[in-house]
Amino acid sequence: MMVSPEGYFEGPNHDLSWHNVDKEFNVFALNQMKETDLILFGRKMYKTMETFWPQAEDNLKMSKENIEIAHRMNTTKKIVFSKTLKGVRKHKNWKNVTIVRKFEPKEIRKLKAQRGKTIWVGGPNLAVNFIKENLIDEFRLVINPVFVGEGTTLFKGLGKRVKLNLVKTRRFKSGNVLLCYRPIKT
């Protein structure tokens, strides 16, 4: 997840225009997608992604990396956790979506135990639920060198301390910095 130095993942009114994305970052994002075979979304993040990615795959103005990211995003299996979402929009590119009405940690543990690639958790509210249940194996935070000033904090409502161990860093030419952490089991 991309985050500002003060901890915001989005600015006021869900503004993401400050996200620092270039070719190097897109190659990184594409490699992340290649490692992923299941994406778990909260409702809000799902709606954001579902609004953008299906059209991006057919947009010839997109970079080749973004078109491939779009294809992978569109075809990768997705589970949306929502009590209120009525259904999913039909789109020729947007496939493999299941709605789950209740967050069940036991069911997530079963998913994690299955063979496969990485499971990606998209959305800060959903991530907080996963953190509270010790279901996150690794946090990949991209610090964007922009102070947003106000917005929505990444892990709002966590309500507990979680100790982390830094396992990897990467500096991008754009000034973005990737920090990979694993939770320290206590």
Image (spheres, helix red, strand yellow):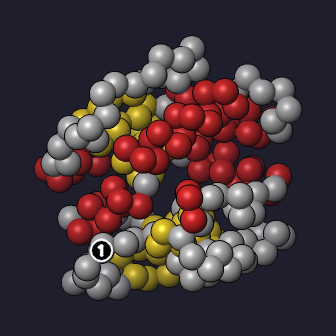
Q: Quadrant of the C terminus?
A: bottom left
Q: Amino acid at mark 1?
A: Leu
Residue found at x 59% / y 50% = 32
* Image location of residue 100, percent across then percent down: 24, 36
Residue found at x 40% / y 82% = 164
The answer, for residue 103, to whether it is visible in the render is yes
In this rendering, the answer to whether 124 lies above or below 80 is: below
The answer, for residue 171, to whether it is visible in the render is no
Q: Quadrant of the N terminus?
A: bottom right
In this rendering, the answer to whether 66 lies above or below 122 is: above
Q: Is residue 175 left or right of residue 161?
A: right
Residue found at x 35% / y 59% = 125
Q: Quadrant of residue 185?
A: bottom left
**Front one among 140 and 85:** 85
**Front one among 178 and 22:** 22
Residue ID for mark 1: 158
SS at circle 1: loop
* Image location of residue 88, percent across then percent down: 40, 25
